[in-house]
Image: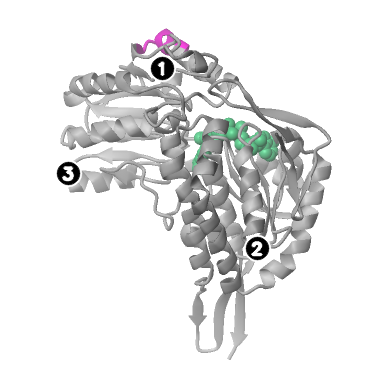
Amino acid sequence: MRIEHLINGKTRPGRDYFETVNPANQEVLAEVARGTAEEVDAAVHAAKEAFPAWAGKSPAERAKLIRKLGELISKNVPEISETETKDTGQTISQTRKQLIPRAADNFNYFAELCTRVDGHTYPTDSHLNYTLFHPVGVCALISPWNVPFMTATWKLAPCIAFGNTAVLKMSELSPLTASMLGTLALEAGIPAGVLNVVHGFGKETGEPLVAHPDVRAVSFTGSTATGNRIVQTAGLKKFSMELGGKSPFVIFEDADFERALDAAVFMIFSNNGERCTAGSRILVQRSIYARFAERFIERAKRLAVGDPLSDKTIIGPMISQAHLAKVRSYIELGPKEGATLACGGLDVPDLPESQRRGNYVRPTVFVDVDNRMRIAQEEIFGPVACLIPFDDEAHAVQLANDIAYGLSSYIWTESTGRAHRMAAAIEAGMCFVNSQNVRDLRQPFGGTKASGVGREGGTWSYEVFLEPKNVCVSL
Ligand code: NAD
């Protein structure tokens, strides 16, 4: 199978191709067009040409087409989920029940919101000030590989709902479902050129897109290192950067132990641990630390690793052999830094013949981790948990904030006052109290410190996808 670029409503072949493989067995799934500055330029040109007519449609007209796209995604959940699972190794139970249906929700939600964009008024005795919001123009949407379809739609839905046009570049490791998105957008009646998809690598395709003078905004999700580079390349453009994380999952002795345990297991091992908001530093109050560690390790040992297409699987393969090597390098590093390997480790999981070539790793737990160790400070982005004891609230805050990142955080306590004090004290874009990560599309999603700049979601998406204008009228 060949996957081509989508430019101005038509497929455009690549001058060269790269392969995308199934991480569960290394089977080649497709040859994918390898974009260069030339295809990027054509895609940006198409988006620029399509912009005036699309921006000129009424929000209600755009909303109708965007809702239709949401409907088409809902109808095609089984096919999109299976493709996503094969391309990424994310388990079918996640893609079918959570990730792909959420993509449809993104379109439904922003279809509604675009009809309700309002501004502010500042009347005085002499003047009336009010704000208008205008679409920005051509937007570059750049997505990582971990939950690609959901992330692409999280960007695309507000982008086009607010009247912008888009050039979407997916990760070279997970390009397949984006091309389905392009086809469905056309089927929904979204005009040619409103969504263009160019495939390819960061340097060859992503960089010319970000640098293109006709691109007015960049919405990027990916690693902190790439985010830093993009900000430098982009120059004066609007941007939103959703970057890496190493989020604290803090459990106090007065927490609901069983619920905290369930959520802790879920927040580090679901999505194969390849999750930006993973609760990868599990801080546990010393008085319950030994009991918690014992139960957590027991649970980690029971997680089913294997074929992501099986409903029973909890942990599928890592996205690529290079990423597997990175995750394994941290598993090797832990004991050298003085952490205790409690379960998992470097032994290859025992799997049937069909999965033997997959990029599998055992769910791994390190206990008695010091927060200054590299395994606690750096984003591993795999099923590797670090358990860190703490003494009291002040110590928990100090450990939680002693990190370059600031994406998400999780607090478990039955004390209302402590929950609010912790939520205020933790340096993170998001804080979940007695809850796993539950997404509300109105919430500001994003991080602080090395986890990013800007927020998306609800009216927060105005920041990147709308340009406010102040109008001042003398009375
Ligand atoms: P990555 O930074 O390697 O790549 C992300 C995308 O950027 C890919 O499409 C890639 O081709 C492109 N790219 C690479 N170099 C580029 C350049 N110079 N110019 C333009 N584009 C370029 O990230 P990844 O490995 O694909 O994804 C994993 C990372 O994403 C993790 O750090 C994870 O935490 C982060 N992530 C963050 C969020 C969030 O919302 N904060 C969500 C998911 C993933």
For the residue marked with disc 2, what is the amino acid? Gly
Q: Nearer the viewer, mark 2 or mark 3?
A: 2
Which disc is residue 362 wearing?
1
Residue nearer the viewer, 159 or 316: 316
Marks 3/1: CA distance?
35 Å
Place of residue 151 in the rendered image (x, y in percent of width and height, measured from the top left): 54, 45
Q: Are marks 3 and 1 in contact (CB under 8 Å)?
A: no
User: Where ligand 1 lies, by quadrant?
Assistant: top right
Left or right: 472 as drawn, with respect to 375 = right
Q: How many marks?
A: 3
- Residue 157: x percent and y percent? 56, 57
Label 2 and label 3: CA atoms lie apart by: 52 Å
Depth order, front residue of 261/409:
261
Above-or-below relation of 359 to 110: above
Q: Which residues are magenta?
A: 332-340
- Kindly indicate the quadrant of the structure image that contains residue 279: top left
Q: Is residue 335 magenta?
A: yes
